[in-house]
Image (tube, grey):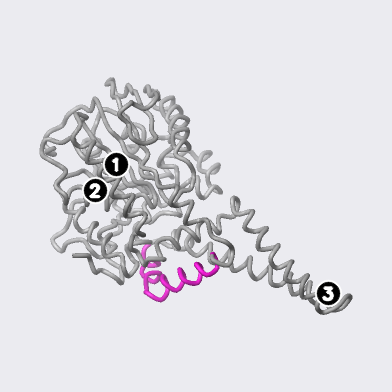
């Protein structure tokens, strides 16, 4: 659809691509229900959820909204890959420590970590956290084990002390793993290790799932809705980039198709695009940032320590064309301005909750409102047509690896 043509959105098909998250998709439905109701009360509009349509092929729900005096119906589907995440996380303690060594070697040895540190220190510290925490757990378990060996040797027998020490060592590591729902060390290690295992290439099982997602979005592009909106959050952002690049390259976006829109939220694209074999993702970024077939808006916030805030993904990855590019429009969610001091204080210690704030209500809402974007009467491009890039946008190319797939 031409940028010059503006049309009220009466029907929308939305696809949400989660990040590296093992939870079932109903979590996102309940999050949307609660936070949507909160935002509607704050912003004084109407939004209601209903069961998904019979045509929906994935877990989802319907949304009926009355925003800015216009009614809009949206169908939402979750493009589910949590089963792949769950399988990748099903690793015992020794395999996790082996993964730690391989992942650290890949990021440090390839120069990727050095490049990432030139962008934002927050997500780099988040990436180093599981390494430090797992090593701390290992050291603590070893020290307690050695103390047990010493005491056993002193008061019982060296053999009994050695057995008891080994048992203490294993029990301590097992206890830490059981507590990972609070510590997130294993979770984050598996997250970063999943991309590093193939040095930035998509694992075969993920590539196959992405092809299914591409087909589903292509089917929606032949329907009579006004907009097909794809939302990629966190790691889901780089999946969305590759999926839509495939969709457009395959010629599945016609001039008569609905408006195609991409909203990326809290992206961590450099964590993958800076790896040595991420040729496919870098080529997709290069292609999509120049495309006229879609509107692409990227939203992040410096207050979110888990994202590469305001980093233009194509530019920092070193694959933006020399003549410049127009996508994505890089915007700040500006947590310091759109969240009250009380809300900021409440969320300040909840690292992961801040990373999900893009999907939640703002008590001092600005231009960015997730529920107006996903359920309101404007296309993504029209909603932000008046905006230019955030003044703090980062575009300097610092990626040590810039090769692209043919």
Q: Residues within 10 Å of mark 3 (few under 14, many from 20)?
A: some
Q: Mark 1 — residue?
A: 230
Q: CA distance from mark 1 to mark 3?
A: 60 Å
Image quarter where the C terminus lies is bottom left
Residue 163 highlighted magenta (yes or no)? no
343 in relation to 177, above or below: above
- What numbered label is drawn on residue 151? 3
Quick one: label 2 or label 1, which is nearer the N terminus?
1
Image quarter where the N terminus lies is top left
Q: Horizontal and vertical percent for residue 117?
A: 40, 67
Q: Which residues are magenta?
A: 96-119
156 in relation to 59, above or below: below
SS at circle 3: helix
Is 255 left, or right, of 73 in this rendering?
left
Quick one: label 1 or label 3, which is nearer the N terminus?
3
Q: Horizontal and vertical percent for residue 369?
A: 35, 35
Q: Mark 2 — residue?
A: 244
In the rendered structure, are the residues bearing label 2 and label 1 in contact, judged by CB atoms less than 8 Å apart? yes
Q: CA distance from mark 3 to mark 2?
A: 62 Å
Residue in the image at 44% along x and 39% along y = 25
Q: Residues within 10 Å of mark 1 (few under 14, many from 20)?
A: many
Q: Can I make out residue 386 in this image?
A: no
Magenta stretch secondary structure, dominant: helix
Q: Horizontal and vertical percent for residue 255?
A: 10, 39
Residue 98 highlighted magenta (yes or no)? yes
In the rendered structure, are the residues bearing label 3 and label 2 in contact, judged by CB atoms less than 8 Å apart? no
Q: Residues within 10 Å of mark 2 (few under 14, many from 20)?
A: many
């Amino acid at each position: 659809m031409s940028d010059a043509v503006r049309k009220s959105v009466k029907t929308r098909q939305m696809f949400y691509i989660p990040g590296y998250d093992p939870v079932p998709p109903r979590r996102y439905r309940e999050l949307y229900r609660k936070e949507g109701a909160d935002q509607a009360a704050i912003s004084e509009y109407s939004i209601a959820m209903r069961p998904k349509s019979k045509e929906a092929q994935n877990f989802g729900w319907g949304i009926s909204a009355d925003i800015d005096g216009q009614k809009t119906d949206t169908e939402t589907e979750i493009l589910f890959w949590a089963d792949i995440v769950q399988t990748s996380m099903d690793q015992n303690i020794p395999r996790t420590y082996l993964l730690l060594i391989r992942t650290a070697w890949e990021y440090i040895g390839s120069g990727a970590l050095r490049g990432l540190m030139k962008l934002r220190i927050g997500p780099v510290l988040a990436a180093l956290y599981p390494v430090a925490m797992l090593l701390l757990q290992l050291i603590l378990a070893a020290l307690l084990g050695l103390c047990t060996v010493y005491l056993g040797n002193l008061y019982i027998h060296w053999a009994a002390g050695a057995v008891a020490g080994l048992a203490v060592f294993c029990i301590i590591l097992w206890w830490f793993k059981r507590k990972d729902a609070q510590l997130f060390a294993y979770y984050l290690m598996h997250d970063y290790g999943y991309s590093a295992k193939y040095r930035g290439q998509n694992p075969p099982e993920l590539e196959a799932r992405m092809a299914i997602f591409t087909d589903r979005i292509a089917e929606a592009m032949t329907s009579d809705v006004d907009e097909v909106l794809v939302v990629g959050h966190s790691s889901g952002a780089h999946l969305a980039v590759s999926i839509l690049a495939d969709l457009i390259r395959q010629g599945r976006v016609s001039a008569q198709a609905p408006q195609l829109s991409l909203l990326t939220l809290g992206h961590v694209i450099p964590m993958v695009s800076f790896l040595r074999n991420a040729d496919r993702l870098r080529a997709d970024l290069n292609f999509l940032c120049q495309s006229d077939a879609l509107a692409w808006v990227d939203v992040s916030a410096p207050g979110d320590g888990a994202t590469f805030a305001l980093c233009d993904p194509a530019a920092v990855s070193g694959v933006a064309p020399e003549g410049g590019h127009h996508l994505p429009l890089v915007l700040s969610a500006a947590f310091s301005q759109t969240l009250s001091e009380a809300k900021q204080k409440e969320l300040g210690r909840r690292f992961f909750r801040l990373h999900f704030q893009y999907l939640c209500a703002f008590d001092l809402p600005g231009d960015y409102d997730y529920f107006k974007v996903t359920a309101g009467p404007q296309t993504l491009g029209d909603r932000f047509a008046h905006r230019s890039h955030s003044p703090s946008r980062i575009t300097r190319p610092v990626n040590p690896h810039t090769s692209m797939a043919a």
